[in-house]
Image (cartoon, coloured by chain):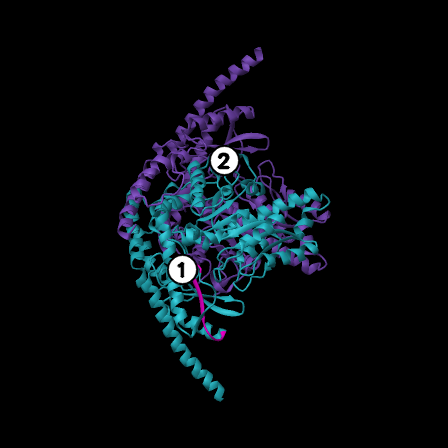
Chain colours: A cyan, B purple
Amino acid sequence: MDTAEFRKRGKEMVDYIADYLETIDKRQVFPDVEPGYLRPLIADCAPQDPESFEDVFKDIEKIIMPGVTHWHSPYFFAYFPAASSFPALLADMLCGGIGCVGFSWAASPACTELETVVLDWLGKMINLPEEFLAEKDGQGGGVIQGSASEATLISLLAARTKTIRRVQSEKPELTEADIMGRLVAYASDQAHTSVERAALIGGVKIKNVSSDDAFSVCGSALKKVLDEDKASGLIPFFFCATLGTTPCCSFDKLLELGPICNKENIWMHIDAAYAGSAFICPEFRHLLNGVEFADSFNFNPHKWLLVNFDCSAMWVKKRSDLIGAFKLEPLYLQHHHQDSGNFIIKRFRSLKLWFVLRMYGVTGLQEHIRKHVRLSHQFEHLVRQDERFEICAEVILGLVCFRLKGSNELNEALLKSINEAKKIHLVPCHLREKFVLRFAICSRTVESTHVKSAWQHISQLATDLLKTWEQNHHQQKQQ
Amino acid sequence: MDTAEFRKRGKEMVDYIADYLETIDKRQVFPDVEPGYLRPLIADCAPQDPESFEDVFKDIEKIIMPGVTHWHSPYFFAYFPAASSFPALLADMLCGGIGCVGFSWAASPACTELETVVLDWLGKMINLPEEFLAEKDGQGGGVIQGSASEATLISLLAARTKTIRRVQSEKPELTEADIMGRLVAYASDQAHTSVERAALIGGVKIKNVSSDDAFSVCGSALKKVLDEDKASGLIPFFFCATLGTTPCCSFDKLLELGPICNKENIWMHIDAAYAGSAFICPEFRHLLNGVEFADSFNFNPHKWLLVNFDCSAMWVKKRSDLIGAFKLEPLYLQHHHQDSGNFIIKRFRSLKLWFVLRMYGVTGLQEHIRKHVRLSHQFEHLVRQDERFEICAEVILGLVCFRLKGSNELNEALLKSINEAKKIHLVPCHLREKFVLRFAICSRTVESTHVKSAWQHISQLATDLLKTWEQNHHQQKQQ
């Protein structure tokens, strides 16, 4: 394909994407295909000779789209949102066109520098303490990672290195393996599994801290387990606090937890993957109070801030902690000013953040967040009006956890009937012993009418289900 | 920005990218900016109100481009190539438009399934043993990772888990920490630093195995260090063989190393990040002989196979080894057929591989590889004709390591004068005690004339340098 054909095909692709997004509400949100559907539809091996763009293009609708879960459909209420916006798509095209690889300043000065500056912008938007910013040549700063899981892993590893060094200087008789064997990380019993996985990767123990009735970890719960573990010779070194847990969007109590971590030499990382975007609104910023005690903080603009995946923003108070844990400099990477903290090869991901922040402006992004929160409260209100249902956790941002009053089996059956109807798409969670349905406001284009119609649909399916359920129950009783 | 404006701006962006790539040879390959150039050029914080696309767009040339290292310029001969092609750019646009997040089958069936099938295609193109393929419901299969570093880390971690389980079953008296403290990984002294970093992350020891005069690790070198380490109670568990080392593109001797690893229960991972793409040409496939002994194999289509970053292809013989090491399944991810081995959240990256394989065809990609190899031999030939220079390692694929006969200082001065002139861009390496210049054929559009003119330029700078160098030397002698 030469440049002339790229101009033609690129424009066709722009129109295809515009058409797709413009009419996405007409597509069934969840596909009909069964696992293994794709292999029989395509060749066994790559073609020897080039195929035309037309041939490939027509396979998008034939082979790909039938197997796509439409994350940007206004009927998609599963997981958490995956951000998407036109400015981000445009920036990503540019990122591909420039096609630089950013692993050092010299490899791509603009890539390294824009990232640092735009993460200062974003940090200021959520009113992060100055220590986390890079401007004025401070020790802190932000970097873009691929995911919150990466950010958690990196902070856990940095904490591990830092702790091993500290303990070795205090007790030179201990080997690294001795210390590793005693290190313990902590996170809420509501935390994302990526925290457990980070500990698994890092080869250290991890323990759950019990959350309270609001699914939040409070200071006394952490204190209790720390005291027990220290008494038995373990070395607590890392606590991952969650703001906006995945099951029900609960918030750990930073203001209680932070001082404990600081006092005990425990690295506090804050994972606000989903909720973090909301902190750009002054009315939600209080949820971040206590961040001043943290060593690292992370949230995902690629979830809720209209920046397409992947763009996970991470800040640390001391960049040297990250660099110290990983720095290995071969000659072919050496260059002045390489200490960006980006130890992973990366694309020019800051472009899309820059485009989105500028083309939406702070107010535009606040509007987006506020609309989602408003819609979740609308849904909450509808649920609360129906006595057959209950709300299972406080609705703070864009997620509503709800269920039919009754057994887990009943709620599993309800979810099954919802997802089999494929008009909307939801996923469940467990809150303690309860099987719960999660209704997450996701799409950029979702409006009040979609929420209302989703609720009517759920309500009707519940009515149908309860009818047969009671009949079965009645029959079972008679037998 | 509404859909109508996206249509307009998207097409403008396509033209901008086409223009950029069409005239990239007119831009200075390495930028003039100094570190810190960007911050003064942009605002201190994000705008409150939306800015127009025009305002953002004009900043690309004003703020971004002055700080871009042009990786796709035909005068860029640094590092290794970063792949770029029009079919990949088109596919990446589509990937952004669909904007799905692939972390389970249900989250995006097409994303999960296309990846598996297309990696079978690619595996067949390089004639991987069938055990590595997923078709016919085998135990093996491929996944796309973000980088070779990720692939190395994942295989090291899988090997760690597997070894700990095995040793614990043999010696139940050992704790996990005991075993961790004795594990040792190995790689060539020429291996990429990401192997050392993987061991650092995994909390295990790593040792260099000495390479021979051709910068290759042979069986006896590995055997020697294994015997020593086993005698002192250590547990060898992982060997990363490199095909196409970063400094000079040397190849470890798989046929000697593989049987040793198999016998000793050592996981053999093969990192062929750059060189792997060449194995699609029958004349280079012999370099991969011995892969049948490996547990995992990785190369980067985003380096040399015209698939834009990021697309690192990794195959394992037993997917269960990867899944076993990381599987943690919360309810909100549970679904049938989730065992894709993709434990990381990801974009729909297989689309670009699929587009490239189809629109180039195997023959088109072979032509690309062969052109690059031909050009490197052309450069080698030019160097060899000039008696002032020497070739420092066998030229096998697209990289030429060369230097002026003489001191390291002289060669450092030559590189400095080349990179300060900014007509071409190179990076150095060390081969043993020698400071060496690397000339890597990189751009998709580089031709014989660019190589010739690069050589004339280097040759002229060498002449100028040697003149002043000899004068200085002469003066020093006289003083």
Residue found at the far top of this picture: B478
Quarter of the figure with residue A65: bottom left
Taking the spot 61% from the left edge, 45% from the top edge, the residue there is A161
Please say whether residue A142 is visible from this viewpoint.
yes
In whole angstroms, how far apart are the C-alphas of marks 2 and 1?
A: 46 Å
User: Dot 1 lies on which element?
Assistant: helix
Please say whether residue B347 is visible from this viewpoint.
no
Near mark 2 (Cα within 10 A), the count class, few <14, some 14-19 or many ≥20, is few
The numbered dot on residue A137 is: 2
Which label sits in the foreground, 2 or 1?
2
Front-most of residues A369 and A260: A260
Give the amino acid type for the residue marked by disc 2 in the picture.
Answer: Asp
The numbered dot on residue B110 is: 1
Q: Which region is colored magenta?
A: A396-407
User: Dot 2 lies on which element?
Assistant: helix
Give the amino acid type for the residue marked by disc 1 in the picture.
Answer: Ala
- The chain under label 1 reads B
Q: Where is residue B264 in the image (x, y as percent from the top left)?
A: 65, 52
Asked if the stretch drawn in magenta spans residue B368, the answer is no
Asked if the stretch drawn in magenta spans residue A401, the answer is yes
- The chain under label 2 reads A
Q: Position of residue B15 (x, y in %)?
A: 29, 42
Front-most of residues A299 and A86: A299
Quarter of the figure with residue A358: top left
Front-most of residues A110 and B205: A110
Front-most of residues A251 and A144: A251
Q: Position of residue A51 (x, y in %)?
A: 33, 52
